[in-house]
Image: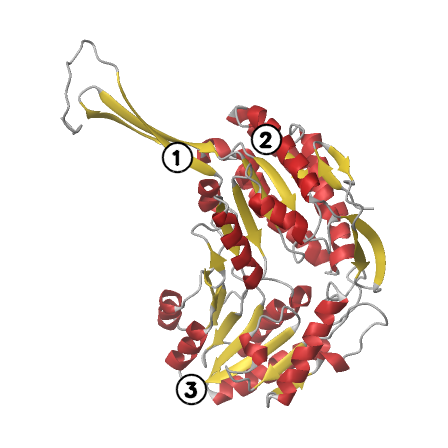
Amino acid sequence: MVSSWIAGRADDGAAGRHGDVFDPATGEVARRVAFASAADVDRAVQAARGAFAEWGSTSLARRTEVMFRFRELMAARSGDLAAIITSEHGKTLEDAAGEVQRGLEVVEFACGIAHLMKGEGSEQISTRVDSTSYRQPLGVVAGITPFNFPAMVPMWMFPLALACGNAFLLKPSEKDPSAAVLMAELLAEAGLPEGAFSVVHGDKEAVDALLTHPEVDAVSFVGSTPIARYIYETATASGKRAQALGGAKNHAMVLPDADIDVAADAIASAAFGSAGQRCMAISAVVSVGEETADALAAAVADRARALKVGPGSQEGVEMGPLVTPEARDRVVAYIEKAGAGGAEVVVDGREADLPEGGFFVGPTVVDRVEPEMEVYRDEVFGPLLVMLRAGSFDEGLDLVNANPYGNGAAIFTADGGAAREFRNRVQAGMIGVNVPIPVPMAYYSFGGWKDSLFGDLHVHGREGVLFYTRGKVVTERWPRRAHGTDYGFPTQS
């Protein structure tokens, strides 16, 4: 049984409701997870509120010390964490280890919180008047995170939230919940006070309890666009600060001067890594010119056919299963729709040599896709790459910009002028130039545009610090003598 973690200890709650956690490589139920009720969430919130009174007033030096200890404990247990991720998500061990490393980069960034929390000051803004600004923690904050990165996405949130002095409540995906519990145990071992970090597993009941609880001050979310919209609207209607990162249809635009082999290697890796279950996966390619399109489709198809699919724990496997049978069936349905709609299914993942059992679909390449097709309009979230064709740079860019999502976009070209034009005009929040998955480093911020983001601030980096704190400006005078009463509006003098 995977338990919640409340007030510094494992907690199964009183609801008696549970969910199944699969081993995606075998299709078997590996364990069960206890679902938290609204009352369980309230207990976690109360524990967090009590812990915040201590943790929020703890010195920056002490908070930094805890973050450093957590970083060392995480590094020592990174192999264990990667194995847990692979067993519940299905991604390869190499991919899981990379996820842990990218999460640790945010922990390392949070270790510099003493610098990140510095304010500003101005002396003598008026006669014998000085002004300073600084930032303070919000209080109790929550993160609701997806299944595709059960360690990295939570670490986009809680290290900075905790380092800023908040107490944090994590509601991870119920599909792969165990990584969150291990991180909670390591935070406790690092010296974080009881209640300052809690994990509440569950479904919509737990989510709604966090979104509407009067003592939760802010909510962060990463997931699909319909749920992101619901999270943002519900949280803000309850008076909370909210950021909700939604879905994506990340495009790669390939120009005629691009190196086709380099582009094909990058696109295949970005489309089929982690079985396409990445919010920054390349799921749509726009080739400029028929010759470019034909050559690229053939090159990507060759790589898709050669890719080794199997259990993520096996050596040499390059792509594992999808996380649930529903996820597998969804991809299969879109392959069928693509063929029926007139697109060319160049590589059909249903026909791949796949292991028995488990939730496997092979890498799929669909060429000659039109913008009105469902397989292009929707976020499929699986190893299905669609390829579109454009007659010119402007036509291709207009196609990319017409998509309602604006998470990430990449261009492959040897032309610096074209790359500059693309990065300046494309309507997306994260841009790659000959880089297929432009996920920013921890000291920058992650987030998209349009229907890929609800809220004003992105996660981690400087914007993460701003999200988990609020500013205060102090104007002070220490007069040597009384000045008398003045009923005019104060001005500089």
Residue with the mark numbered 1:
471
Residue sitting at x 61%, y 70%: 271
Q: Is residue 88 above or below residue 210?
A: below
Residue 35 location (% of width, % of height): 74, 48
Amino acid type at circle 3 is Gly
Residue 75 location (% of width, % of height): 68, 41
| Left or right for 246, reference 98 | left
Query: Can see residue 413?
Result: no
Residue 213 location (% of width, % of height): 58, 41
Disc 2, SS: helix
Q: Is residue 260 above or below residue 467?
A: below
Disc 1, SS: strand
Q: Nearer the viewer, residue 428 or 115?
A: 428
Query: Can see residue 465?
Result: yes
Amino acid type at circle 1 is Gly
| Left or right for 141, reference 126 | right
The answer to which of marks 1 and 2 sits earlier in the sequence is 2
Is the residue marked by circle 2 packed among few (<14), some (14-19), or many (20+) residues within 10 Å? many
Q: What is the quadrant of residue 105 in the picture?
A: top right
Residue 84 location (% of width, % of height): 77, 50
The answer to which of marks 2 and 3 sits earlier in the sequence is 2
Residue with the mark numbered 2:
49
Is the residue marked by circle 1 packed among few (<14), some (14-19), or many (20+) residues within 10 Å? few
Residue with the mark numbered 3:
391
Residue sitting at x 51%, y 27%: 60
Residue sitting at x 66%, y 66%: 273
